[in-house]
Amino acid sequence: MFAECLSVIVQSLTNGSVDKSPLALNSLKLDGIDSADSLAHLTTELSSAHAQIAELSTKINDVEETLSSTQKELTRSQELNTKLQRDVREV
């Protein structure tokens, strides 16, 4: 039942609007909770989840950029280390 209700909400939100048709609202009766309140609550949760996903996506991009620059720095350090080891052997 919950999955069906969530599916109805997600389908209605994919186009940016909330479907408040009687059929959609009637399918949202969850354990005696008012349909409109259920829809509002689930819509709020969905919006919150979208915000969290956007925040995590930004953090992931930052971490990936840091990783990339750190890998480049490591490669440069390894190359310098190799060069210095050769120099030490020559001396």
Image (tube, helix red, strand yellow):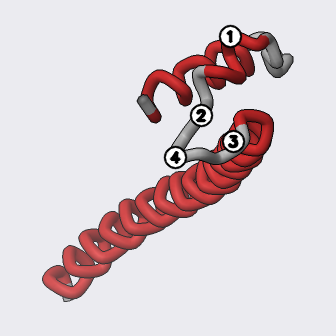
Q: Quadrant of the N terminus?
A: top left
| Residue drawn at the location 65% of the way across and 47% of the way down | 33
Discs 2, 3 touching: Cβ within 8 Å: yes
Q: Quadrant of the C terminus?
A: bottom left
Is 28 placed above or below 87 here? above
Q: Which residue is mark 3?
A: 38
From the top left corner, tell me how far across and down residue 67 is, in percent.
47, 60
Amino acid carrying label 4: it is: Asp
Q: Which mark is residue 41?
A: none
Drawn side of residue 78 relative to residue 3, left or right: left
Give the number of the mark in front: 3 or 4.
Answer: 4
Q: Which residue is mark 4?
A: 31
Q: Which residue is mark 2?
A: 29
Q: Residues within 10 Å of mark 3 (few under 14, many from 20)?
A: some
Helix, strand or loop status at disc 2:
loop
Q: Residues within 10 Å of mark 4 (few under 14, many from 20)?
A: few
Q: Earlier in the sequence, mark 2 or mark 1?
A: 1
Discs 3, 4 touching: Cβ within 8 Å: no
Amino acid carrying label 1: it is: Leu
> For the residues marked 2 and 3, what is the alpha-carbon distance in whole angstroms?
7 Å
Q: Residues within 10 Å of mark 1 (few under 14, many from 20)?
A: few
Discs 1, 4 touching: Cβ within 8 Å: no
> For the residues marked 4 and 2, what is the alpha-carbon distance in whole angstroms?
6 Å
Q: Earlier in the sequence, mark 1 or mark 4?
A: 1
| Residue drawn at the location 72% of the way across and 42% of the way down | 34
> For the residues marked 2 and 1, what is the alpha-carbon distance in whole angstroms?
11 Å
